Structures are given as structure tokens and as C-alpha cells.
Amino acid sequence: MISYNNDKPLDFNQVLKQEKEIYKKQLINRNEEALLIDLDIIKKRKIKTFSDRVYNRLQNLFILKNEKYPDIIWRKILSNLYLEGKINALNCSQINSSMILWILIEKKIINNTEIIIKYYPFSNWEKLTIFSNISNNGFTNIYYPFNYIDFYTKKEKECSPKWWDFTPERLENLSNWEMHFREYTKNYFKDIIKKWFIIYDPACSTGTFLWYIKNHFPWCKTIGQDLSEEMTNYAKNFVDEIYTGDAINSPIPNNFVDIMFLRFLNSEIVTTSKSYELFDILEKKVKKWWYIVLFWHTAVLLKQEYFLEHRNFKILKSSWYDPNNNTIFQYYVIKKE
């Protein structure tokens, strides 16, 4: 993978130029044949080292944990949705075989400024084989170890309130970002959502996601909430009940909701500490034995280990395969027990 290795953050055009180079270098020809691989042979290869500055989009690096393989380092490349002009962000939630990089040996951060990763390299056909073997495993853990740290403040980045300002462009972007999520949600819950179900989205933005669910399950009740009054004024036309305000002050009673969708406890939206604080408050809104779902186009900040360590949560899904795009993406379905 190409290292940025610059002394200060680049502007958007410079980043885009660099990301295009990374895209060209990592992109795999899908016509290459996927064959059986031998991990023992791979681990006899010469150890290589990658280094870069901590502010150079490390949030795009992630580790895939699957029982078939040792920890594997991946990196997001330019999203097809961006290349097609459907979203304005460079990356999205969908992960493909071209994002596979190496078998992780060691990773460390030096003086909070530089990351160093030691690894065994893969060939392209080995990457295709790995992706083929893990794509349909709904329990593959997609783990993002590096937060987006602002170069100037040295703090974890979160979005400003202005990001949520309602514009036609943002409406279109939000809709395009979540198309595969909507489709999978419909398919996953088709035999679960009952007539009396209450479905809550405490960061509902335009309300399109809840509207999609209501359209396919008209017998359920949808409740939306959002920090932006402009968003809730728009969303009220698409949900049964709407509230304006910070989700940390949710007006929904405890033990009231059957399914809660959390689409904002994510990197670059809130900080990691805030995501856990919000979850601890919001999970109480869900009835025992029912569902909490977490996803979005940036990384879910709550780690899988958090749910495994709490006996009152059971992970039913942590990732999903999209056959239409031949991609996988984070999609946590948690059952509250």
C-alpha cells in the first residue's frame, strides 16, 4: 500500500489524488482465479514493514477477524458510490477483495505520531480466495483499531452540528449511502417484525430509512428522533412519531422499543467515549429479548468484545454479504437478553 508520509494534512484535492493512486495500486482484476492457499507458506515469506503518519486516514485501516484466518489488515479504497457520483465522501461501508492487504504480525504507534505495521504479503489471487471464503460468514468481525485523530487538536474527530444542516445534496447522499442497508434490513427482519412492533431510530435524519421499513411492514409503528430540527421537519412526513433533540435525552420510555436502529455511534460522527455513553442510555429503551442494530457508512465505534463481555447481549450478526455488489459490510444485530 502507498504511504502518505507527509508532514501535515493534505487538502481535499491532494487527498483525492493520493487516494486515486492507492485505488489503482490495490484494485484487483476480478477475472483472476481464486485458488487454494497455504498459510504456512505465506508465513515463510519475507516480513515487510509499512509506516505512515497517524493523521493520514488511518480510520480506513481495519482488521478482519475470522476463525479461518489469522488477523488480516485491510484498507478502504475509493468507494464505487463516490466514483459514480452518488455520494460526496471518498469511502463507504462496503468492503471488497481489493481492500485486503496483509497478514498482521505487529502494529504499534510511535510517539503518537507514526504507525508501524509488520506483515506478510498476499498475492492478488490469495486475496480473492480469502474474500470468497469469508464473505458469507455473518460472524466475521470487522474491527477498526485506529480512530480519526485531528492533526491540530490531537483529539478524536466528531462531526460538527453544521454537518446535519438539511440540503438537497445531503438528502441524496444519505439515501445513496444506506440503500444496501435498507435492503438487507428488509430481508433480515421479514419474519421477525410483528404487527405490534415499535421501531425506534434516535438519529433518523431524513426519515427515509424508517419510511422504507414502514413501507414493507405497514403494521409496525415507527418513531424517529434527530438533533436537527430541519431534519425532523422533513422526516415527520415519513414516520409515525417524531422528536427533535439529542439522543442522550431520549423521550422514549425504558423497555418500550422492539427494534432500535443505531446509525450514528460511528467514527467521525461521535467520539468513542460518547458512543458508549449513548449506548448505555439507549439500550435501556429496548425490551428484553428484542433487537438493537448498529451500522452506517463509517466504522461502528462499539467493539464486538463489549457485547461479548456483557451477558445480557447476544450477537446474532456482525457482518453481511451483499451479492449485488460482491461486498461485505458491518451490520451488528444484538439481541438483548
Image (tube, rainbow, N blue to C red):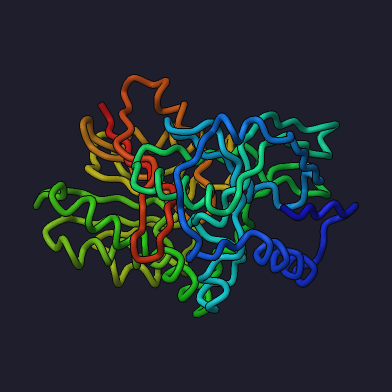
The location of residue 277, given as percent across then percent down, is 51, 34
Q: Could you tell me how many numbered marks the image carries?
A: 0
Compared with 286, 266 (above or below) is below
Residue in the picture at 39% in, 48% down: 135
Viewer can see residue 262 = no
Seen from the viewer's position, the closer of residues 310 and 18 is: 18
Depth order, front residue of 174/128: 128
The picture places residue 215, in percent across and down from the top left corner, at: 20, 67
Q: Residue at x 57, y 54 (%)?
A: 124
Q: Quadrant of residue 323?
A: bottom left
| x, y percent for residue 122 | 61, 45
Vertical placement of residue 249 versus 309, above or below: below
Quadrant of residue 72 within the rendered picture: top right
Q: Identify which residue is drawn at 47% across, 65% down.
A: 229
Q: Is residue 190 left or right of residue 324?
A: left
Q: Nearer the viewer, residue 47 or 21?
A: 47
Farthest residue toward the left?
Answer: 195
Residue sitting nearer the eye, 132 or 11? 132
The answer to whether 219 appears left or right of 285 in the picture is left
> Residue at point 24% right, 42% down?
257
State left or right for residue 57 relative to residue 190: right
Percent x, y of residue 210 = 30, 61
Image quadrant where one finds the C terminus: top left
Residue 155 visible in the displayed image: yes
Farthest residue, direction right = 7
